[in-house]
Amino acid sequence: IEDAFLNDNNKNIFQRIIGFLISTCNTFFVMSRDGIMFYWLNKHILFYCFFKLTSNLPSGCINSINIINAQNHFKMGEDGALSLGIMYAVIGIGTAIAPIIWKKISKNRINRLETIIYINYLIAAICCVSLYFSKINFIWFLVSNLFRSGGPATIYIFSSSILQQTVPDKYRGRVFALDNALLLIGTSIGIIITGFTVDYLNLDPFDLYLLMGLVFFLGFIFWMCFFLFLKKILTKDNSVLLPQDYYNNKNKI
């Protein structure tokens, strides 16, 4: 009797585990399907997520170049520790202050947020050109980084603000998961580009500032065209279509 009880108990535990795994897989499938359908119906939301990729790819590259230049070209203290510390302090100030200033101007209106985003791409591009010429002076280098660091920070915060205002609660987690994944991917690719071009192609680190400035400028052109023209084709008044509504309308037809 005891053996039969143990066998039944083990069988029940096994069935519960199998049921839990099937339920989890089914939930994952349904949520993934709805998430993909949400992006398909709201392509402008997918475009918003790519702010992180197009902004943080050059930012990741520039941050790596800054470390190299602070330790080698503007070396202060042991192994450039002092110059590196000063540079990070200045970048931190730019990152903190710029979004606050722009926030006062935007008043959290989506159309203003969008305009400020592509303006900051242009500001970042100009600052990259300034960084290229800053090799002659450390103060110039710091001031260029002060204004340059505010660009990607503002783009990051304002694009997240647009997503928070636009995406329904039910899909917000899936949207921000992709959003942050693209952030990390962009930064990692930028760091890889720095390592490859400096170590294997022997490119001058200051020349990379010009290349990343071009990337920011292309981002400015693309996002300005998106906001002014393409977005009007993809959506009206930032409205969002839900997969459930799409399925219901399809069934009615």
Image (cartoon, rainbow, N blue to C red):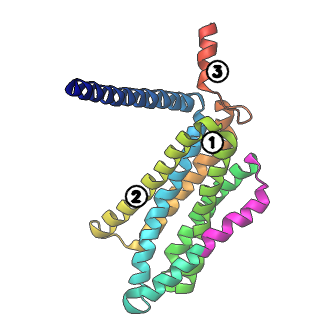
Judged by depth in the image, the label closer to the viewer, 3 or 2, is 3
Helix, strand or loop under label 2 = helix
Judged by depth in the image, the label closer to the viewer, 2 or 1, is 2
Q: Residue at x 65, y 36 (%)?
A: 168
Where is residue 169? Give x, y as percent. Answer: 64, 38
- First in residue order: circle 3 vs circle 1: 1
Q: Residue furthest top?
A: 253
Disc 1: which residue:
226
Classify 221 as above or below 93: above
The Cα atoms of the two marked residues, 3 and 1, are separated by 26 Å
Residue stretch in magenta: 93-110
Disc 2: which residue:
188
Disc 3: which residue:
245
The C terminus: image quadrant: top right
Q: Residue furthest front?
A: 1
Q: Amino acid at mark 3?
A: Asp
Where is residue 214? Give x, y as percent. Answer: 51, 59
Q: Nearer the viewer, residue 131 or 1?
A: 1
Helix, strand or loop under label 3 = helix
The Cα atoms of the two marked residues, 2 and 1, are separated by 25 Å
Q: Amino acid at mark 1?
A: Phe
- First in residue order: circle 2 vs circle 1: 2
Dots 3, 1 in contact, CB < 8 A: no
